[in-house]
Image (spheres, rainbow, N blue to C red):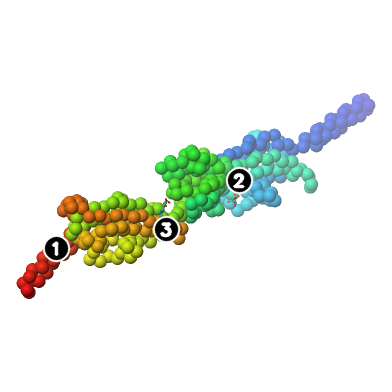
Amino acid sequence: MFIIKILIFILFLSSFDSFIMIKAQRNPTISFISKDKVVNIGDNLELKCQAQDAESYPVAWTKLSPSADQEQVFISKGQSIIIPSNRHQILYDDRDSTYTLIIEKIQEIDVGIYRCEITTAVNTKIWADVPVIVRIPPVIADNSTRSVITAVGERVTLKCYASGYPTPMISWRREKNRLLPNQMAFYKGNNLTIEHVTKDDRGTYYCVADNGVGQGARRNIGVEVEFPPFVRAGRSLVKQALQYDADLHCHIEAFPSPSIQWYKDGQIINDNQHYQINTFVRTDEFIDTTLRVRRIEKRQFGIYICQANNKLGTNQTMIELSESVNIVCPPACDVGFYLSDATATNDYYHYRFLSIFIIMAIMVSR
Ligand SMILES: *[C@@H]1O[C@H](CO)[C@@H](O)[C@H](O)[C@H]1NC(C)=O
Ligand SMILES: *[C@@H]1O[C@H](CO)[C@@H](O)[C@H](O)[C@H]1NC(C)=O
Ligand SMILES: *[C@@H]1O[C@H](CO)[C@@H](O)[C@H](O)[C@H]1NC(C)=O
């Protein structure tokens, strides 16, 4: 009987022993962690960490910053949030021992690796990680080209960079779908190089950054090309009868804006009662200038020169004004032509009237 009692006692002890051993062998484990997350700004995010046999251990959510030093910040410990934030919450479900970290209204700063961590002994931890990536619409970086002024024959590179996640694709276009240096309407890459700039390369270029998040971003880059003037006559031979007006037209292309002169017989022509110069800027690079020769006198027939110059050069063209027996319209006789220039019309009749008056006065005085 006594032996039996002892046996039972030993059995009891051993079973108790093994119970303690089993209990001690059950180290905490992380049995579930959320998958990698890719989220949009403003979203709410839930990260789950299921900790088995961890009732008596501290379970923490921490965050490793994406910077090189990977600084670790503790967000929660057990069932409390330990950072000053009203966007973070921790929920604990004791049925499946899951710690759910909730982050509301995701911001760019929430990017990083979230780590669920259980400290099992003074120097021992177990953990599991969830990377969180935030989608960020593209923003064109400040170091991108804003505008350039270049000159014919030079080499120029337009640069465009953009931040955002995923990494934005950078592409180029031109206004009115003009061709890019690759002879296409579209070019992909950060750097757009024009090897030998020509006049035709001037205009607006678009750098477009797109990563599928939001609308994408665009920057308009102005390319101005400096080039020497090119001067062309409207007609290189203009005919008119004595005493009538004639218009000499000259078209100029230049950038920067040129200074313009009309010459006859080596003399600069100024606005006066014999000549009227009208200059009309059509665009930055195109200028029209018209010389009106008023009530032509014999000495006003001959060769006129229209000349333009800017810092890159000078160009000129010749226009001959020669006498005709017929009156050439316009600008003579066609009143409609004068409608746009009323003062000229008035002057014209004014001078006619004045000359008749003078002739009469001379006759009377004799
Ligand atoms: C321009 O800035 C972007 C982002 O700010 C950077 O990634 C890129 O390397 C810079 N490029 C140059 C040429 O400085
Ligand atoms: C663009 O130019 C920058 C500096 O000028 C250079 O570092 C970079 O490698 C170029 N990028 C490409 C794609 O050629
Ligand atoms: C004006 O420019 C054109 C085109 O560049 C050139 O062919 C012509 O020789 C120039 N004329 C003068 C007088 O410089």
What is the distance, in whole Å, between disc 2 and disc 3 at their CAs? 60 Å
Q: Is 25 placed left or right of 246 in the picture?
A: right
Q: Is 356 placed left or right of 7 in the picture?
A: left
- Residue 205: where, in percent of width, then height? 46, 47
Q: Earlier in the sequence, mark 3 or mark 1?
A: 3
Give the residue pinned by disc 1.
352
In the rendered structure, are the residues bearing label 3 and label 1 in contact, judged by CB atoms less than 8 Å apart? no
Task: Report helix, strand or loop for mark 2.
Answer: loop
Q: Quadrant of residue 363?
A: bottom left
- Residue 164: where, in percent of width, then height? 55, 45
Q: Quadrant of residue 166?
A: top right
Tag 1: amino acid: Arg
Q: Earlier in the sequence, mark 2 or mark 3?
A: 2
Task: Report helix, strand or loop for mark 1.
Answer: helix
Q: Of the residues tagged 2 and 3, which is closer to the observer?
A: 3
- Residue 144: where, in percent of width, then height? 53, 51
- Residue 111: where, in percent of width, then height? 60, 46
Q: Quadrant of residue 115?
A: top right
Q: Is mark 3 within 8 Å of ligand 3?
A: yes
In the rendered structure, are the residues bearing label 2 and label 3 in contact, judged by CB atoms less than 8 Å apart? no
What is the distance, in whole Å, between disc 3 and disc 1 at their CAs? 39 Å
Tag 2: amino acid: Val
The residue furthest right is: 3
Residue at image coords 65%, 34%: 96
Residue at image coords 35%, 52%: 232
| Residue 327, placed above or below residue 131 | below
Judge by depth and name the residue closer to the eye, 290 or 327: 327
Q: Which mark is residue 314?
A: 3
Q: Earlier in the sequence, mark 2 or mark 1?
A: 2
Q: Which mark is residue 111?
A: 2
